[in-house]
Amino acid sequence: MDALPCLLEYSPEALTELLAGWGHKPYRATQLTEWIWKHRATDFESMNNLPPELRQRLAASFSLRPLRVIEVNHSTSGTTRKFLSRLEDGHSVESVIIPAAQGQAGAQSERLTLCVSSQVGCAFGCKFCASGLLGFTRNLTAAEILGQIVAAEELAGERIDNLVFMGMGEPLANMDNLLKALEQIMHPKVLNIGARHITISTSGNVPGLQRLAEFNRPIRLAVSLHGASDDVRSRIMPVNKKWPLSQLIPALQRWRRSSKHLITLEYILIQDVNAMLPEAEKLAALAASLHAKVNLIPYNTVEGLPWQRPTEEHCRAFCRVLIRHRVPVTMRYEKGHDINAACGQLRLRRETGAAAEPQQRG
Ligand code: SAH
Ligand code: SF4
């Protein structure tokens, strides 16, 4: 039997329309929206201010959760948590909860960031990435994207206030579902996370960038560049053959003109591939032309892949070239490396099979 559609992807407006079609007044949709998003109801039975016939009809037509958390892993530092969710069709996706301390003297406040997946696997096949190794299975629905946030909030016992689309998959290759999920994420009566707290990471999908620009919300953009020349980039990112730098750079310039935020260029440092110092000079020139900031990520090893992380000393030397050119640069020491929850390490170790109860691994 096919899974029931999930109400998480119905906006308050869509619920009003749905219930109007069933002969109900708009206030019923307001009540339903509150049950879903304020009280986080997991069954229709508990929605005790809705008439029983309506509850029954909803239960026969819709679900409230599109996925089930089946495994939780904690990093050794105890802060980063990766969880694996089973989707209705038996596939699984991973998401990572990352607390980031925002400290001012004496007043520490924690922001909770969630790294979400947008697809099962990825079709782009970047040579260094665990998700790319898997190949592409399918797009996630908007409800499955939203379901990861709801699950994370249930696990953490608090609200997620920062969202990064840096899990498995290429978000801009799943545009319709991404935009539908974003509407819900930003909706004040739904998740109410501001566009400024959402980062979309793309490997350089040029038509997708155009559509995201037309969406016209101040979302942050991260671009997985990883090569500042076509020969280096094409070697590790097949997407560069389809949309080479001669197309990607103008698309980023257009994005920059329409957005108030700096673009972040993600650059993994891989020994003898893209981490040679002359490449740093090219990267500095490219970043300067885009007024972009650069995030250097010493490569996270992926089982089965030959690539190596350069020495820390070499990473610092690469970083210094950018600093010398006055390019804003950060070097990301990743959280969650020990549980394979760091960028590019998300891959499904469990495949379909009997669903297990959530496990805590530490
Ligand atoms: N498909 C999108 C979203 C995934 S984000 C994209 O590529 O941008 C995952 C981030 O982790 C990307 O910047 C990706 O290039 C990076 N990444 C992939 N494999 C990695 C690895 N082994 N070590 C460090 N970063 C990696
Ligand atoms: Fe896909 Fe991004 Fe991994 Fe490339 S880096 S294979 S686009 S998830």
Image (spheres, rainbow, N blue to C red):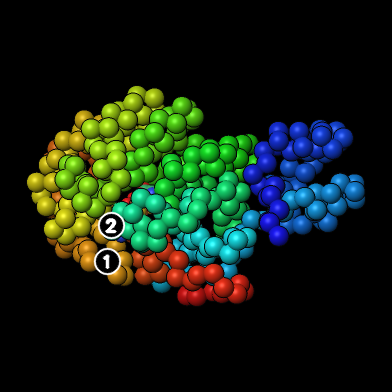
Q: Earlier in the sequence, mark 2 or mark 1?
A: 2
Residue 340, x across and y down, in percent: 38, 67
Q: Residue 127 carries which label?
A: 2
* Left or right, 7 with reference to 26: left
Q: Name the residue under label 1.
A: 305
Residue 281 versus residue 18: which sits nearer the camera?
Answer: 18
Q: How far apart are marks 2 and 1 (CA)?
A: 8 Å
Q: Residue at coordinates 17% horizontally, 52% vertically from top-left?
A: 274
Q: What element carries label 2?
A: loop
* Left or right, 28 with reference to 178: right
Residue 158, x across and y down, in percent: 59, 55
Residue 247, x across and y down, in percent: 27, 32
Q: Residue 260 falls in which quadrant of the image?
A: top left
Residue 123 versus residue 297: which sits nearer the camera?
Answer: 123
On the question of residue 217 being in view, the answer is yes
Residue 348 versus residue 79: which sits nearer the camera?
Answer: 348
Give the residue furthest to the left.
278
Q: What residue type is labelled 2?
A: Lys
Q: Residue 262 falls in which quadrant of the image?
A: top left
Residue 57, x across and y down, in percent: 84, 49
Q: What residue type is labelled 1?
A: Leu
Tell me if mark 2 has few (under 14), some (14-19) or many (20+) residues whose alpha carbon lies within 10 angstroms of its own. some
